[in-house]
Image: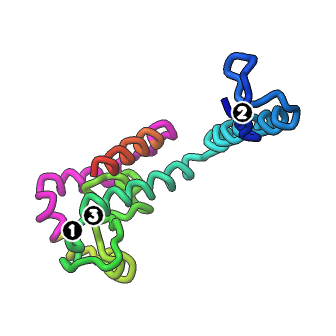
Amino acid sequence: MRCKVCKDKFEPKYFLQKVCLDPTCILDWSKKVKEKEWKTEKKILKDNLKTNADHVRELQVIFNKYIRLRDKGLDCISCNKPAKKENAGHYYSAGGNPELRFNEDNVHLQCEYCNTFLHGNLLNYQENLVKRIGLCRFAKLKRLRGTAMKYSIPELIELKVIYKDKIKQL
């Protein structure tokens, strides 16, 4: 067997022995193990310190990526032109309607120009949204607007897992 630190051959005297019995190798190995344990512990501590807003921000990035992948190959929902820079555009804004922020019927591929410079180009967005999702789903989306809803941290974590899986499937 070879020492994990100095790479010299040695005969292990103990079960699961990873390094030779040279004191410098033992010290280096124990430092590496402690560093690895500390990194793991630090990651857990960081995750425990995350606020609801931190989780929403992370989920928004994952969700937007999913929308861009889901609508890949489709034209901008507002102007019906191929998007040079693709955005995930919300019909009902995420800031004013947090309950619809992660609703897949509310978010579609939009070009940078329509989403940013035309503030969503909403008249054309609505017309094409009805064509894309149908009148029934559009009416349901309208009804959901204004319903009080706040995601809890466990719900946000679960949604992150769901959308990461959906991205893998695409």
Residue behind mark 2: 9
Query: Mark 3 is on which residue type?
Result: His
| Residue 81 shown left or right of residue 148 in the figure | left
Q: Where in the figure is residue 13, as x and y percent of width and height?
A: 75, 17
Residue drawn at the location 40% of the way across and 61% of the way down: 94
21 with respect to 109 (left or right) = right
* Mark 3 nearby-residue class (10 Å; few <14, some 14–19, many ≥20): many
Q: Amino acid at mark 1?
A: Gly
- Magenta stretch holds residue 146: yes
Which mark is on residue 97? none
For residue 46, above or below residue 85: above
Q: Which residue is mark 3?
A: 108
The residue under the point 22% across, 71% down is: 77
The magenta stretch is: 128-155
SS of the residue under disc 3: strand
Query: How far is disc 1 from disc 3 in space, using C-alphas?
Result: 12 Å
Residue 130: x and y, percent?
A: 14, 63
**Of marks 1 and 3, which one's residue comes earlier in the chain?**
1
| Marking on residue 73 | 1
Q: Residue at x 49, y 40 (%)?
A: 152
Which residue: 77% across, 35% down?
A: 29
Q: Secondary structure at mark 2?
A: loop
Q: Residues within 10 Å of mark 2 (few under 14, many from 20)?
A: few
Cβ–Cβ under 8 Å for marks 1 and 3: no
Q: Earlier in the sequence, mark 2 or mark 1?
A: 2
**Left/right of residue 52 with respect to residue 140 in the rendered view:** right
In the orientation shown, which residue stands out farthest toward the right? 23
Q: Are marks 3 and 2 in contact (CB under 8 Å)?
A: no
Camera sees residue 35: no
**Amino acid type indicated by mark 2:** Lys
Q: Nearer the viewer, mark 3 or mark 2?
A: 2
- Label 1: few (<14), some (14–19) or many (≥20) C-alpha neighbours in 10 Å: few
